[in-house]
């Protein structure tokens, strides 16, 4: 396995499961709930689920936190701010907001894999104000303007 970036992680509680990839070519690291007891998320409710660790991302990187496809398709469990961004200068506990868009209450069990985190490079552009933008064929046409077929 090729590791070109180091992600420093620190357990905040002994029970925490550290982020890990569950297959050799997985893009995301699974994030697990660090709970003392099961947590029920009622239909339509949002719960902020602790992961029990903090981390130090290298400068120029972010952690993109995304829903797990299985929880989303089977139970309607997603994230209200998907994808969430963890900035390289954040040192607090990693926590995942989950929303229950399903039709039944959902129970998050301790150590359950609840989300995935993709480590990605970020650019820090220089912002330049201009009076005019370059023309394109699309121009200012917005949502749905390119059709669906």
Image (cartoon, rainbow, N blue to C red):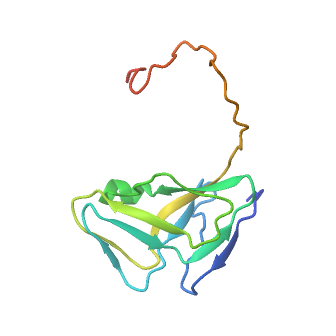
Q: In the image, is 144 to the left or to the right of 129?
A: left
Residue found at the very far right of the displayed protein:
4
Q: In the image, is 15 to the left or to the right of 101?
A: right
Along the viewing direction, whichever of 144 and 129 lies nearer the viewer: 129
In the image, what residue occupies the spot 21% across and 59% down?
A: 103
Q: In the image, is 23 to the left or to the right of 125?
A: left
Q: Locate the C terminus by quadrant.
A: top left
User: How many numbered marks, from 0 up?
Assistant: 0
Asked where in the image residue 110 lies, by quadrant, the reply is bottom left
Q: Position of residue 42 (x, y in %)?
A: 26, 68
Identify whether 92 is placed above or below 87. below
Asked where in the image residue 118 lies, by quadrant, the reply is bottom right
Q: Position of residue 43 (x, y in %)?
A: 24, 63
Q: Locate the N terminus by quadrant.
A: bottom right
In the image, what residue occupies the spot 26% across and 58% down?
A: 102
Identify whether 52 is placed above or below 125. below
């Amino acid at each position: 396995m090729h590791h070109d970036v180091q992600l420093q992680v620190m357990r905040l509680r002994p029970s925490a499961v550290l982020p890990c990839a569950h297959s050799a070519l997985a893009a995301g690291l699974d994030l697990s709930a660090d709970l003392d007891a099961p947590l029920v998320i009622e239909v339509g409710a949002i719960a902020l689920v602790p992961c029990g660790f903090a981390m130090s991302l290298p400068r120029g990187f972010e952690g993109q936190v995304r829903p797990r496809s299985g929880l989303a398709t089977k139970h309607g469990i997603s994230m209200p701010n998907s994808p969430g961004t963890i900035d390289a200068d954040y040192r607090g506990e990693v926590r995942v907001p989950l929303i229950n868009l399903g039709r039944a209450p959902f129970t998050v069990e301790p150590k359950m894999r609840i989300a995935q985190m993709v480590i990605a490079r970020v650019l820090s552009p220089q912002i330049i104000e201009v009076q005019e933008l370059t023309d394109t064929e699309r121009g200012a046409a917005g949502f749905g303007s390119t059709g669906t077929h």
